[in-house]
Amino acid sequence: MTDSYHVGLEVLARTGAELDARRNRVAEVAPDFARLAIGFAYGDVFSRPGLDLRLREFAAIAACAAMGRSAAQLRDHVTAALHLGWSKSEIIELLTQIAAHAGVPAALDALVWCHDLLVEITDCQTCEESGSNDGQE
């Protein structure tokens, strides 16, 4: 096993992700590919200096949502972002921003794909905002 793979596993653990059923299924039929994917994406790219892990997840969510090709990957990155402290309202705002740059269908799909992840959590910032209107409507 390469150092990149081990670093990748450490980065995944920091995001709250463990080896899940999907990665295990890939590893079952293509173990070299699974090691390469984790080693490159997380061991070589996500572990680079210059951006913190929260910003890297922001970029990953934006890219996955804009491409509109992988609901599973988008959900993984939204879950990681929530684990790293992103709020529900920040993720919704990011996915809304996708509409301006990648189109309404891409943003709509992203919101639908992550619906359950975003409905199940309480965003304290949103609770505070809706609880006090400071005389503004």
Image: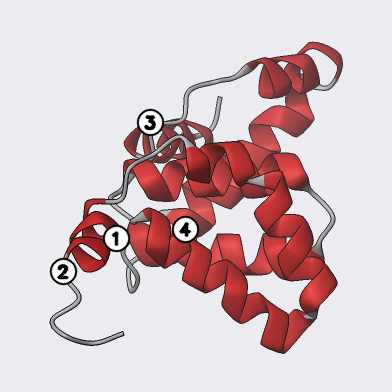
Q: What kind of element bears circle 4?
A: helix
Mark 3 vs mark 1: in front: 1
Query: Mark 3 vs mark 1: which is more N-terminal?
Result: 3
Left-right relation of 15 to 94: left
For the residues labelled 1 and 4, the Cα–Cα distance comes to: 21 Å
The residue that mark 2 highlights is 132
Residue 59, position as x, y percentages in the image: 53, 68
112 to 10, vertically: above or below: below
Mark 2 vs mark 4: in front: 2
Residue 6, position as x, y percentages in the image: 45, 31
How crowded is the residue under tag 3: few (<14 C-alpha within 10 Å), some, or many (20+)? few
Q: Is residue 48 visible?
A: no
- Which amino acid lies under the numbered mark 3 shown in the image of this protein? Ala
- Which amino acid lies under the numbered mark 4 shown in the image of this protein? Glu
How crowded is the residue under tag 2: few (<14 C-alpha within 10 Å), some, or many (20+)? few
Mark 1 vs mark 2: in front: 2
Q: What kind of element bears circle 2?
A: loop
> Which residue is drawn at the image coordinates 41% and 38% (left, top)?
7
How crowded is the residue under tag 4: few (<14 C-alpha within 10 Å), some, or many (20+)? many
The disc label shown at residue 126, or none: 1
Of 96 and 32, nearer the camera is: 96
Mark 1 vs mark 4: in front: 1
> Which residue is drawn at the image coordinates 46% and 36% (left, top)?
3
The disc label shown at residue 13, or none: 3
For the residues labelled 1 and 2, the Cα–Cα distance comes to: 10 Å
The residue that mark 4 highlights is 57
Mark 3 vs mark 4: in front: 4
> Which residue is drawn at the image coordinates 35% and 70% (left, top)?
51
Query: Mark 1 vs mark 2: which is more N-terminal?
Result: 1
